[in-house]
Amino acid sequence: MAIPVKNNPLAVAGFSKNAARIANPQAVNNQGSFNAILEKSLQKIDTSSSGGIDLQSLSREQMDILVKNMQIQMNRQLFNIAFNSEEKNCFPGLGVLADYMGSLTTSLTEVSKNRQMPSPNDFSPERLNLDSIIEKAARRYEVDPDLVRSVIKAESNFNPQALSPQGAMGLMQLMPETAEELGVKNAYDPEENIMGGTKYLKLLLNRYDGKRDQALAAYNWGMGNLEKNQRSLPAETANYIARIDGYYKNLKESA
């Protein structure tokens, strides 16, 4: 951080035995059709179910289609069981059936909803269109853009809404006091954050005669701490510098 200058897995393997034990023979025969629901739904989205169903491999759109098809097919089966059965004693099992299908559609819907929220590992400069901002800041403050990218990667993994337990904010994890000193009004705004963080990084590089590791140590640990204890970096800061050096090297090698 920039220190101030001062699933539960879901298995769908057919119908539960309790739900299948409905007194009416016609209702029992309906069990086989339930096993085909997923297969039919998956066929509609060009997904094979021959080797088991991997829900995690489905896209958001495919998951929505699957959920809708499941709901339609399940409602149809419930209707058939309830109104086409000759023996009324099948109805006690209907409650078990409804509970099972309700929980299944709820679980599928939750998986589908969760696909809308990217994990921290999903963030990247390309995804968030940050490259132009990084290049702009790097030119303005004469800092290597790959160093800025590496700091952002280490600080927030390109998550503009990141907030540390200590209160560091945004892409370059600016502390409130640092943001204020740098003139950053909204630390969660990507452009303001990157501009402010790059400006601060340049200040540190100038202070330590362009020595990158020292500038990074001060960025993470604070200038005061670094200058009082230059030979005894905490493990966290040493690891921080090593991570950024690794990111920086990879960017240069892949260029």
Image (cartoon, rainbow, N blue to C red):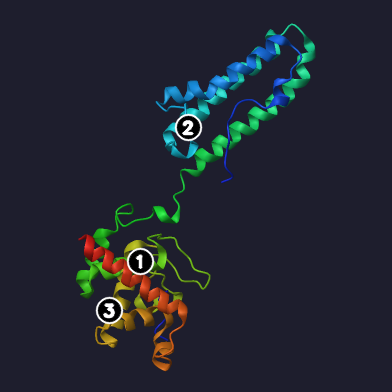
Left or right position of 155 against 194: right
Q: Where does the image place residue 73, in percent across and percent down from the top left?
A: 56, 20
Left or right position of 188 against 78: left
- Closer to the chain start, of discs 3 and 1, is 1
Left or right position of 183 against 98: left
- Residue 211 or residue 224, whichever sits in front: 211
The tally of labels here is: 3
Q: Residue at x 41, y 83 (%)?
A: 222
Residue type at mark 3?
Lys
Which residue is label 2 attached to?
Answer: 64
Residue type at mark 2?
Asp
Q: Is residue 132 above or below residue 217?
A: above
Left or right position of 204 against 55: left
For the residues labelled 2 and 3, the Cα–Cα distance comes to: 48 Å
Q: Where does the image place residue 112, in percent across and percent down from the top left?
A: 50, 38
Q: Looking at the rendered structure, which numbered label has been put on residue 202? A: 3
For the residues labelled 3 and 1, the Cα–Cα distance comes to: 14 Å
Which quadrant would the N terminus be assigned to in this image?
A: bottom left
Question: Mark 3, residues whose alpha carbon is within 10 Å: few (<14), some, or many (≥20)?
Answer: some
Q: Looking at the rendered structure, which numbered label has been put on residue 152? A: 1
Residue type at mark 1?
Ile
Q: Looking at the rendered structure, which numbered label has been put on residue 57? A: none
Q: Where does the image place residue 172, in percent across and percent down from the top left?
A: 37, 69
Q: Secondary structure at mark 2?
A: helix
